[in-house]
Amino acid sequence: MTQAPAEEEHNPWLVGFVVSLAAFMEVLDTTITNVSLNHIAGTLGASQDESTWIITSYLVANGIVLPLSGWLSAVLGRKRFFMLCIATFTATSFACGMSTSLTMLIAFRLLQGLSGGGLQPVQQAIILDAFPPQMRGAAFGITGVTMIVAPILGPTLGGYITDNFSWQWIFFMNVPVGIFALIMVARVVEDPPHARAHWTGAIDYIGLLLIAIGLGSLQVVLDKGQQEDWFGSSFIIFFASASAICLISAIAWLQRQKDPVVDLRLLSIPTFGLSFIMMFFVGASLYAGATLLPILTQSEFGFDATLAGLVLSPSGIAVIFLMPIAGRLVNKVQARYLIAAGMLLCSIGMFMTMRISPQTDYASFVFMRIMQVIGLPFLFIPTSALAFSRIPKEKSSKASAIFAMARNLGGSIGIAIMAGYVVRHEQIHQSYLVNHLSSSDIGYRTALSHHVNSALAHGHSLAGATGGAIRRIYGQLAHQADIMAFDDGFAVVGVTMATLAILALFMPDNNPRRQLDPEVVAH
């Protein structure tokens, strides 16, 4: 007897919830350790610089597996590969929590990234098959919660767990969720015929090696570039060269393969290729904002890890409430108009964040972050719907892998560019402000006199009072320069998204009232 596909046997909402559970935990782990590095480094006797490899190792491994997950699904069968990812991700999460040295933790984080890298693209492919075409908006609303909300909540949850329990529980909490997800996936998910194992017996070792080295090296460059002074470091030059050579070679090699491990030909489909570019910038905006704001609040406003995370979490709740609205609109409004509106809303939010000053309080930061992400549901859902509108079912796994890579790669590049930009502009603003610290400037003379008189009133000598006053004024200047640099960073993201809002209007048309069968459209 032929087994019925999953969507005929089980409620698609149940399938969506089950497969999203493990994927949510995996995406959460991309940001959950960001605010906990100091605690981890202190416990394991490592330096701050060394501890950043906890993040880098995970992202490198994750970035390698993401584009390969479509091919691995075809080789092993989609359900079997998904369950293998859940099982190994759960086991390595437990091993991370049990680590007693930094070397051990980095090794297990590497394995955790490798095992979890296939979860989000396979989750998307399963949900696409579980929901009928007319419910694609709802389907992408579920995957949107995973891909957008999880990295927003990561720092909040990580900060709370670290401050109130111990950093080990960041990893231990994955274990019961992973076990439950594994049991439920085994019960409610079935592979449709096109998603079952169909290994031809041949492995493209060259393609696999080129992609693994190319993407792995690129991730190292992006994550360590600012710390190592970019191309002033032989370490960065080596990995950048390896990445460029391998990725260029991989593109040339894969184009000649009949059944490539990463099907780059899908990018030649206009709806998919242009949506890939848009999703790249969605990832850059999402991760750049989620990284810059906690750094700013902790370094310049004295927030602890929990409070810095709580700046982000209300925006995640706002996104969850907006997802259903965007899901309904995607079946009524042209995708390009929704994408343009989403880009414009995010752009306005970024420009509003330029109003940060030394007097900005917690509530203002929360409002600014909500405005930064309020347009994301109107970006992610229509972009995803447009991307997969002309992808045949048998290509959905490979397309999902490439599409997930766009968001992750965009996030890594966005963080790297913005971090470097902010550092450079801190120096520029400091230099500009220092030029105004002269005896001819009335503001400087007034501030200096005030601080000197205050110190003299507390019994300091004139020389000591003057030196202390100058140091205090310079500290205030550096604080102001840093805030101005972050304002500049948010302005760059705002201008980029405003430009993309205009470009989105020229994306291909889609007819939201007439759901097309991708298998028919593709031929």
Image (cartoon, rainbow, N blue to C red):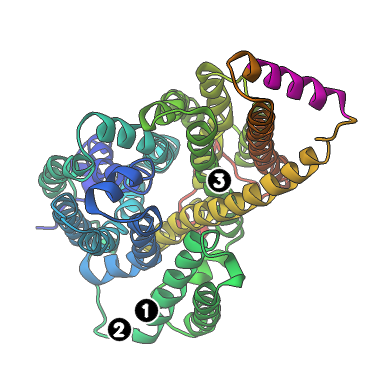
Q: Is residue 424 magenta?
A: no
Q: Main secondary structure of the magenta part?
A: helix
Amino acid type of disc 3?
Answer: Val
Residue found at x 54% / y 77%: 234
Q: Look at the numbered disc 1 and give the secondary structure of its residue.
A: helix
Kindly tell me whether residue 382 is visible in this rendering.
no
Q: Look at the numbered disc 3 and give the secondary structure of its residue.
A: helix
Name the residue carrying label 2. 203
The reply to whether callout 1 and callout 2 are in contact (CB within 8 Å) is yes
Task: Work out whether residue 336 or residue 376 is closer to the camera in this orientation and state it.
Answer: 376
Amino acid type of disc 2?
Answer: Ile
Residue 371: percent from left, percent from top: 58, 26
Amino acid type of disc 1?
Answer: Leu
- Give the label on residue 208, or none: 1
Task: Work out whether residue 37 or residue 115 is closer to the camera in this orientation and state it.
Answer: 37
Quarter assignment of residue 454: top right
Q: Earlier in the sequence, mark 3 or mark 1?
A: 1
Name the residue carrying label 3. 282
| Mark 2 neighbour density, 10 Å: few (under 14) some (14–19) many (20 or more) | few
Q: Which residues are magenta?
A: 441-454
Task: Work out whether residue 66 or residue 158 is closer to the camera in this orientation and state it.
Answer: 158
